[in-house]
Image (cartoon, rainbow, N blue to C red):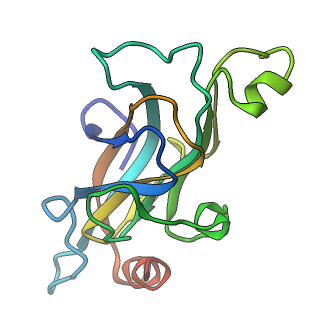
Amino acid sequence: MAYNVKDVFFLSTSTTIAASTANGGSAQLDLSAYIDPIARGRTKGTGLAIYKVQYSMGQATAGEPIDDAEAGSCRFGMFAGAGLGDVATGGISLVTGNFAATNALMVSSGDFYGPKSMVANASPPAAGLMLETQYLSPDTQVPYVIVRDNVCLVYEVGDNFTSEHILSVRLSCAQISLDQATLNQLLRTQTV
């Protein structure tokens, strides 16, 4: 399946990062309508190819941009088949290994640093500016193919946020047919 206007569609979700709260949270996106990991006779299994992942972060108040006094930071990402559900800030605690490039369930990941966070203030030439870096992402040539029935937007707070924020994600994706060998390999690697 090619990355083109005919085949690609968008899925999105968001989660609220609470102010003054440590640890992490998640928002689960149900993919069961797009995936069928069982090949039947001549019918191939179906997976969901993720070509691009785009994130946004903003204040929860009236869609405003990040306040210049925001000191919060977090690591965020999309985990295939994690099955965490919708969890408020502080409800889960993710470790560094969850966000590592070696995690087979990691579709995409990045970091956010508010303008008054220690990293943003110490990093010229962006001193005093918000930093958002995406360090792992699929691409249009080599998509991440999900064969599990969910994907979770997850985050782990580094420095507590000064105010409530909304973390959002948009996935550029397409349904693709998978031969049995590829399907079996993906099912093995996407086991929690």
Residue at the image position 38 percent from the left and 13 percent from the top = 64
The image shows residue 173, relative to residue 130, as above or below, that is below
Question: Front-most of 22 and 106?
Answer: 22
Residue at left 36%, top 55%? 26
Which residue is located at x 50 percent, y 18 percent? Answer: 66
Q: Is residue 1 left or right of residue 33?
A: right
From the top left corner, tell me how far across and down residue 15 is, in percent: 32, 43
Q: Which is nearer the eye, 70 or 167?
A: 70
The image quadrant where one finds the C terminus is bottom left
Residue at image coords 61%, 67%: 95
Query: What is the x, y in percent for residue 42?
Result: 17, 80
Would you identify the image quadrant in which residue 110 lies? top right
Judge from the rendering whether residue 30 lies leftward or rightward of residue 156; answer left or right. left
Task: Find residue 33 and report its image quarter.
Answer: bottom left
**Side (left or right) of 61 relative to 52:** left
Mark yes or no: residue 137 visible: no
Q: Position of residue 176 (x, y in %)?
A: 30, 58
Residue 47: which quarter of the image? Answer: bottom left
Q: Could you say which is closer to the camera, residue 33 or residue 120?
A: 120
Up the image or down, 90 lies above or below 148; here it is above
